[in-house]
Image (cartoon, rainbow, N blue to C red):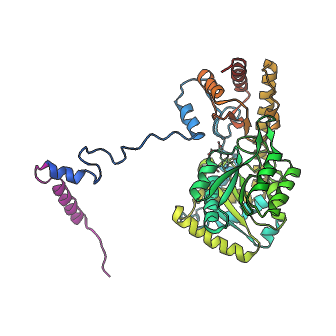
């Protein structure tokens, strides 16, 4: 068999030849024809010179601006990332323990995972979101694939639907997480919105929601935030979920759940998964995107899962085979480390229990921040009804502050938040509440 191997001397010869070729003669025309790109023309400018500077991401760009601010009192309430009372990022204790276990295990290797990811992680993730006694799991009519956190799970699910589902329109809440429309448009779906939030009550526009979903063409896909709606912090009640389920099933609408905050809304993993479990209990089909970024604090590990619940095991098997065709050319196979951490924690009863306690502590701290901020505004006699701060659920408060007010607070108080007035309650601490309350008080008492 012929092998193509270069000895160092033959590769030296090749490099030498290349250098001679590049520097041959003093003919500058010849040189520029070597160096210039084919389309740069006589000016020699970049082929990318026509590009305009793209704007920063509306959420992640807030952190970029925050990092540039030298002020010692600056406060980042933009991205939804949990911080301790000391304002520090948190690595859960249970995650540290799982990582130690992984490091101590010398049999662990770094081979590629299969296209669908870590199989044990997939099984445990399905159990976590659907419940151990889920009929879909019992009947083996679910496929779960590991994806790159919640975003990757949404993207893979969106592209799968665009390729294989008869309806190409997805309805998303108005408003929603800013990345949703981009993810689904790039996946090949047409994005439309349904009414969700009522600015007048700062609560759910349930009537509008029912009307819009009722008017959607049969079979349309509907994106549902499983809990802790982003950015509004407003969730339907269980009775309202039941009405939504009935309406969607009667019209054959396809539900696609985005579960980015399981455990962060109520502090209980099971309570927060209830709406999804209602849609699975009726025997119908649905998609679920799960993220471990927030509830296990694995943000940068990019670990999540996409589950597709089908009518039969046979269909689920074929769905999985097609999901592999979506994933393989996109990123080939997912990373091993984050999914291994999750698997260690979910498979071990003690670690699992410890995790639920740490998760509950994070959820409770956020709830306590809500109370403290509400009280601080009351003490200051800040005009307006701020009760939505304690009524809303999950990581965010949708304050109702407008972009001009947000910009004032950033400029004068060094408080960073998204321009729609959303604040991450998880970024607040007892120490920083007074500063935020001062800023809100100032901005609503002066008219900007
Ligand atoms: N879905 C929703 C509703 C989200 O709010 C987020 C994250 C994701 C999915 C994706 O998260 P993941 O890919 O990291 O798992 N939203 C954050 C971060 C917390 C972000 O914008 O990327 C936010 O600040 O809104």
Q: Residue extending furthest bottom? A: 1
Measured as percent of width and height from the top left, residue 306 is found at 67, 61
Measured as percent of width and height from the top left, residue 208 is found at 79, 46
Name which residue lies at 74% across and 57% down: 216
Name which residue lies at 76% across and 75% down: 312
21 part of magenta stretch: yes
Judging depth in this view, the residue of 143 and 52 nearest the camera is: 52
Q: How many marks?
A: 0
Measured as percent of width and height from the top left, residue 327 is found at 57, 65
> Is residue 251 visible in this depiction of the protein?
yes
Judging depth in this view, the residue of 93 and 368 nearest the camera is: 368
Measured as percent of width and height from the top left, residue 100 is found at 63, 53
Identify whether 386 is placed above or below 438.
Answer: below
Judging depth in this view, the residue of 310 and 413 nearest the camera is: 310
> Is residue 266 visible in this depiction of the protein?
no
Q: Quadrant of residue 144?
A: bottom right
Q: Find the magenta span and give its range.
A: 1-27
Identify whether 201 is placed above or below 241.
Answer: above
Identify whether 2 is placed above or below 439.
Answer: below
Name which residue lies at 79% across and 24% down: 384
Please state if 251 lies on the left or on the right of 290 as rendered: right
Q: Quadrant of residue 322?
A: bottom right
Name which residue lies at 57% across and 69% down: 325
Image quadrant for the C terminus? Answer: top right
8 part of magenta stretch: yes
Please state if 71 lies on the left or on the right of 362 as rendered: left
Q: Residue extending furthest right? A: 239
């Amino acid at each position: 068999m012929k092998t193509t191997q270069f000895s160092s001397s033959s590769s030296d010869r090749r490099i030498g030849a290349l250098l001679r070729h590049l520097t041959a003669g003093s003919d500058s025309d010849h040189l520029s024809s070597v160096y210039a790109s084919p389309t740069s023309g006589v000016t020699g400018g970049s082929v990318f010179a026509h590009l305009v500077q793209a704007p920063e991401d509306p959420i992640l760009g807030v952190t970029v601006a925050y990092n540039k601010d030298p002020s010692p009192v600056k406060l980042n309430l933009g991205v939804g990332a949990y911080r301790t009372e000391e304002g520090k990022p948190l690595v859960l204790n249970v995650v540290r323990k799982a990582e130690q276990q992984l490091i101590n295990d010398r049999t662990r290797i770094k081979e590629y995972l299969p296209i669908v990811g870590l199989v044990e992680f997939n099984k445990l993730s399905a159990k976590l979101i659907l419940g151990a006694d889920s009929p879909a799991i019992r009947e083996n009519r679910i496929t779960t694939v590991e994806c790159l956190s919640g975003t990757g799970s949404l993207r893979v699910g969106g592209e799968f639907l665009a390729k294989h589902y008869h309806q190409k329109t997805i309805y998303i809440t108005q408003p929603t997480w800013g990345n949703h429309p981009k993810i689904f448009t790039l996946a090949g779906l047409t994005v439309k919105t349904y009414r969700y939030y009522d600015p007048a009550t700062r609560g759910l526009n349930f009537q509008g929601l029912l009307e819009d979903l009722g008017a959607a063409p049969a079979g349309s896909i509907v994106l549902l935030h499983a809990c802790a709606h982003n950015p509004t912090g407003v969730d339907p009640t269980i009775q309202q979920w039941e009405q939504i389920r009935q309406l969607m099933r009667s019209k054959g609408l396809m539900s696609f759940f985005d579960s980015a905050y399981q455990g962060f809304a109520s502090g209980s993993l099971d309570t927060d998964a209830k709406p999804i479990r209602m849609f699975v209990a009726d025997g119908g089909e649905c998609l679920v995107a799960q993220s471990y970024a927030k509830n296990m604090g694995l943000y940068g590990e990019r670990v999540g899962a996409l589950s597709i619940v089908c009518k039969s095991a046979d269909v689920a098997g074929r769905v999985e085979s097609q999901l592999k065709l979506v994933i393989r050319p996109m990123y080939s196979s997912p990373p091993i480390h984050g999914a291994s951490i999750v698997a260690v924690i979910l498979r071990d009863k003690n670690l699992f229990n410890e995790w639920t306690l740490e998760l509950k502590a994070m959820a409770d701290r956020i709830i306590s921040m809500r109370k403290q901020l509400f009280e601080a505004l009351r003490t200051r006699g800040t005009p307006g009804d701020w009760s939505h701060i304690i009524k809303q659920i999950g990581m965010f408060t949708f304050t109702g502050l407008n972009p001009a007010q947000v910009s004032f607070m950033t400029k004068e108080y060094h408080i960073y938040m998204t321009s729609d007035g959303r604040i991450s309650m998880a970024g607040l601490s007892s120490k920083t509440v007074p500063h935020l309350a001062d800023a809100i008080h100032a901005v609503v008492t002066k008219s900007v």
